[in-house]
Image: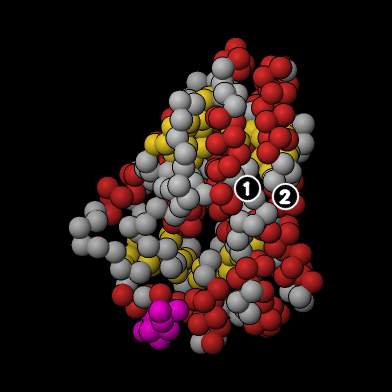
Amino acid sequence: MIRPSVVYLGRSRLQRNRANLIQTLQMMEAFRLVGLDATLYLPPWPNSLDLATRLREFGIESSLDIRSSWLLNRRWNGKPFVTLYGRRLRQAAGVYTRSVQISATLAAAGIQHQLEIHEAERELIGKGYLADIVKHHRQGIIEWLFPISHAAAEILIRAGATAERVLVSPSGTKLSAFAPIAPFDPDRLSAPRIVYLGRLSRDRGLDVFQQIAARGIANVTLVGEQEDAVQTSGKLEVVPFVPHREVPLWWERSDLILLPYQRNLPHADSISPIKLFEAMAAGRPIVVSNLPAIREIIDHEKTGLLVEPEDTEGWIAAVRRLQNDPQLARRLAQAAKEKARDYSWEKRAERIARACGWLAS
């Protein structure tokens, strides 16, 4: 059987440790697993970087077709690439991108493609891409729009996008990576450890973590790159960035997972954080910011606890509530893990591929 050929055009830099790269690589693996012959083109990376080693750092053991092209240098928005490879792009079963800049270039060349939408307000509205994206969608040049949240979908549809070709596709997780980790142990809540993985910044709740540690409520481990300086203490430690393949082991060390995204986080309007789905797959009690896009995933007091982002005392109260009610903590952890099954990268890739007609319905 011939596998449908899909070309994925990206702007992520293979040498950088960013969520957009994680998501792109995981989707490439998932496209392959659901039966697509997918090729990913990225901007050039250093000669010293070994592709197979880099993929293993992301927990990807599959052989992926990833190619470097200087024609995708970010300053050109894919224009030289589309000019040179236009014939191949037109012959492919599908062309996919999560870059609105590359989408604009494809549209200008009249090449049909699919566009994944991430930052609705900051990028589509703030940078003025919304009107053209909607126009190209209505014309069919952008066949499908795949916003990562209903909040982003509403912005697109209100602006005139064809609702029947807008499919909300939240981020996901690799469920198999979390299968081996130890289950949640409510007996450890008397002296819990809170682990956070990601960039360390105030708009991601750094002040909340520092207050929890300063009051001696929990031991806090922050794993990642410091965007804002962290005040360490006896209850708070910082671990430098770790490869993504090690993420499940760090979530395993956590007794509670807090994700205190602040409203001033640039993409808070349409956030669909990979680490939220990882926390769910890890089967840990989750406390997360009460933001519209988060409420699409987490049901308050059913699969997690929602707290107003700026309410530091509310975060502390949520931690104490789980400490004082281990049965609630266990119930939330189990429910979150069960719900995580709906958010595997494979299921996401299959839904997208079927919508696009790359796989039989």
Count of labels shown?
2
Identity, as a three-letter code, of the amino acid under mark 1 = Tyr
Along the horizontal axis of the image, is 103 left or right of 337?
left
At numbered mark 1, what does the secondary structure look like: helix, strand or loop? Answer: loop
Query: As rendered, which of 95 and 172 lies closer to the eye?
Result: 172
Query: As rendered, which of 125 and 137 lies closer to the eye?
Result: 125
Residue placed farthest to the top in the image? 187
In percent of the image, x 52 and y 49: which residue is there?
201
Q: On residue 334, which mark appears?
A: none
Residue 238 against residue 137 in the figure, above or below: above
Neighbor class of circle 1 (other Cα within 10 Å; few <14, some 14-19, many 20+) is many
Looking at the rendering, the stretch of residues picked out in magenta corresponds to: 75-85
Query: Is residue 284 visible from the viewing direction of this image?
Result: no
Along the horizontal axis of the image, is 344 left or right of 299?
left
Q: Residue 78 in magenta? A: yes
Quarter of the image containing the N terminus?
bottom left
Identity, as a three-letter code, of the amino acid under mark 2 = Leu
Residue 262 image position (x, y, % from top left) = 64, 50
Disc 1 target residue:
261
Residue placed farthest to the left in the image? 48
At numbered mark 2, what does the secondary structure look like: helix, strand or loop? Answer: loop
Magenta span: helix, strand or loop, mainly? helix
Quarter of the image containing the C terminus?
bottom right
> Tag 2 or tag 1, which sits nearer the N-term?
1
Disc 2 target residue:
291
Q: Quadrant of residue 133?
A: bottom right
Residue 198 image position (x, y, % from top left) = 48, 45
Query: As rendered, which of 195 and 19 lies closer to the eye?
Result: 195
Q: Residue 215 in magenta? A: no
In percent of the image, x 52 and y 70: which residue is there?
99
Q: Are marks 1 and 2 in contact (CB under 8 Å)?
A: yes
Residue 218 against residue 111 in the figure, above or below: above
